[in-house]
Amino acid sequence: MKDKTTNYFLVLSLIKKHDAITRTYLAKLTGLSNTSIGKITNSLILDGWIIEKNGQDNSLGRKAKLLTVNPDGLYSLGVEIEKEYTQLAIISFDGRIIKSKKVINEFSPPDSIKHYLDWLSQIILCLMNEVQARIKEKIIAVGISVPGTVDATNGMVVDSSQLQWSNVKLKNVMEKKLNSEVYVENHVRSILIAEKLYGGLKHEKNAVCLYIGSGLGTSVMINGEVARGSNNSFGEIGHMIIDPNGPLCECGRLGCLQTYLSLESIKKQYGKNIQKFLEDYYNGCKGANMLMTKIQQYLNIVISNILCMYNPNVVLLCGPLFYDFEIFKEFLHENAGEYVWEPLKTNFKLKDVENGRISAMLGASSLVIDEFFKSK
Ligand SMILES: [Zn+2]
């Protein structure tokens, strides 16, 4: 692909961005002549990246030939590593899942990273062998999503309390094992990338994913770009201190936000599992009722603080707290505005993740496509 010009990839990414576009509009956007656009798009068609279809030129209101990416032009393989399981899929250029697998981790990742990564490379290679050769040949790279702090530039898992990994050179190790390019990203950022490419954030530029699971975190998109911060920790609001005399957090400090609002904290505060807590709540138990009021108050505070900090158009609710327990999602959809400062109330929308539980895996594969276009 080295012989291709910059304009070749510029035109390809514009076609991807616009879903369907005419040659005339491409010439207008790029400033290239109609002849150059004609040559480049013909070459993109011959190379299998794009296809031509009949459609309508909205600016002229008449029938026109539209160019769109070839859904089978390339494939990527996305992997989501979680504490208990690993989920992986081969995904087409337009986000269709071709083949997927969810496997309970055979080696518990914290016990033996080396064994786990050997096993992981085996299940990835197996999945690649389960699809037709014409698809396998077009898998351009592997994307991996991991819970924890990830240095995406170097593909390193800096710290993951869920997996109990620190300084794992995941990209290096997996590239050697798979003989393929590998990208690594934090799981909440992976969700943001997936929703940007295929879900409810497609037309948004400023958005936040609020993830609540065993911990709490956000990923943030500012002016269309994923924010990472100087230390890859942008959006780690779960470790904002709410009360310096509060409960002990996994980070070793006292009173972090996630010690008040996370699945883990609800379990600790109630002394029983979430199902039992909700059962007691529905049966009118006083203790459960008090805790629910407190959780709901923190949910509203988090939304209000997110809006003050990042001023997004959309806050996307994701993570097991919302996937597994509708009550929290429903509460926020009805009450999220309670503490929000008046000027921030306009234009603000609360949304659910469109791709649900597979969004981190989908995000890991989207990352590959995102990087592919950036590197051209
Ligand atoms: Zn903390």
Image: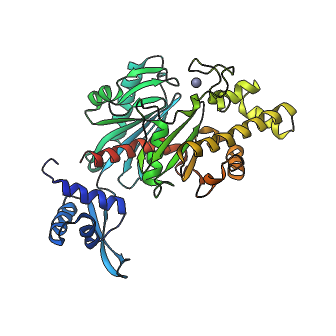
Q: Nearer the viewer, residue 48 or 346?
A: 346
Q: Nearer the viewer, residue 34 or 55?
A: 34
53 up-or-down from 152: above or below: below
Q: Nearer the viewer, residue 376 or 179?
A: 376
Drawn side of residue 134 relative to residue 310, left or right: left
Drawn side of residue 34 relative to residue 283, left or right: left
Instruction: For residue 255, say whether it is visible.
Output: yes
Residue at 77% of width from left, 32% of height from top?
276
How far across and down, in percent of the image, does residue 222 sit? 45, 47
Q: Residue furthest front?
A: 343
Residue at 45% of width from left, 51% of height from top?
196
How far across and down, in percent of the image, does residue 372 sit? 29, 46
The part of the image, by quadrant, that contains residue 24 is bottom left
Colour setting = rainbow
The number of discs equals: 0
Q: Residue furthest left?
A: 3
Instruction: For residue 131, say whether it is visible.
Output: no
105 up-or-down from 351: above or below: above
Residue at 87% of width from left, 33% of height from top?
286
- Quarter for ligand 1? top right
Q: Nearer the viewer, residue 289 or 225?
A: 225
The part of the image, by quadrant, that contains residue 345 is bottom right
Q: Residue furthest bottom?
A: 62
How far across and down, in percent of the image, does residue 142 sit? 34, 39
Drawn side of residue 41 relative to residue 192, left or right: left
Drawn side of residue 288 relative to residue 158, left or right: right
Residue at 25% of width from left, 71% of height from top?
23
How far across and down, in percent of the image, does residue 318 sit? 57, 43
